[in-house]
Image (tube, helix red, strand yellow):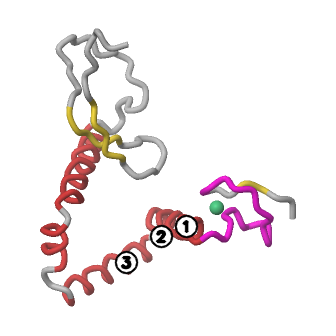
């Protein structure tokens, strides 16, 4: 087989067969499995139902786990709230143009200063926390 770039890390590797798109690095194999699970969750209702049932059983056997997790990881709680807000907005705006904004913002009082989550809308990447500061006009 000819060498090809890995779908996850873009490192050039020699695949063992025609169906191998990811190199053998552990993080790339995790990405491959996660992509497979996402595809399976979207396309296989039996898999989705079995997964949901398994999660419900696990939650019954581990009462209080998620409450403790949220208490111990407040940054994850904040991130999840932000992402859920975005998902809700996407559902609300389903069918409307979400990628290209046709009417550009013209408000002059818009001051995006503070801490925000930068969430990719097209690519499935993790959100990144960013800080936005104002730069004084005198800064060079
Ligand atoms: Zn790779």
Give the residues drawn in magenta, as a range.
8-25
Q: Residue furthest bottom?
A: 61
Tell me the crowding category of disc 2: few under 14, some 14 to 19, or many 20 or more residues within 10 angstroms, Cα based: few
In the image: residue 63, left or right of residue 120: left
Q: Nearer the viewer, residue 57 or 62?
A: 62
Which residue shows up at 16% across the image and 69% down it?
Answer: 72
Q: Is residue 14 magenta?
A: yes
Q: Could you tell me how far apart the alpha carbons at marks 3 and 2 are, in whole angstroms?
A: 11 Å
Which of the two discs, 3 and 1, sits closer to the camera?
Answer: 1
Front residue (pair 70, 98):
70
Position of 92 relative to 126 (above/below): above
Q: Main secondary structure of the magenta part?
A: loop
The answer to whether residue 24 is above or below residue 129 is below
- From the Cβ of disc 3, is ligand 1 less than 8 Å away? no
Residue holding disc 1: 27
For marks 1 and 2, give the CA distance. Answer: 25 Å
Q: Which residue is mark 3?
A: 51
The extreme right residue here reads: 1
Q: Position of residue 140 (x, y in %)?
A: 38, 13
Q: Quadrant location of residue 119?
A: top left
Residue in view at x 34 percent, y 40 percent: 118
Q: Quadrant of residue 45?
A: bottom left
Quickly name the residue at label 2. Answer: 44
The answer to whether residue 41 is left or right of residue 74 is right
């Amino acid at each position: 087989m000819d060498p090809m770039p890995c779908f996850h890390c873009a490192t050039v590797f020699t695949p063992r067969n025609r169906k191998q798109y990811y190199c053998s690095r552990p993080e790339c194999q995790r990405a491959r499995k996660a992509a497979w699970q996402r595809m399976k969750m979207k396309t296989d209702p039996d898999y989705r139902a079995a997964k949901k049932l398994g999660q419900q059983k696990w939650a019954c056997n581990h009462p209080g786990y998620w409450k403790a997790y949220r208490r111990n990881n407040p940054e994850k709680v904040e991130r999840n709230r932000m992402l859920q807000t975005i998902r809700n907005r996407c559902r609300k705006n389903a069918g409307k143009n979400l990628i290209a904004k046709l009417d550009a913002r013209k408000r002059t009082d818009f001051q995006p200063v503070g801490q925000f989550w930068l969430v990719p809308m097209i690519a499935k990447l993790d959100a990144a926390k960013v800080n936005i500061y104002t730069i004084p006009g005198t800064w060079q």
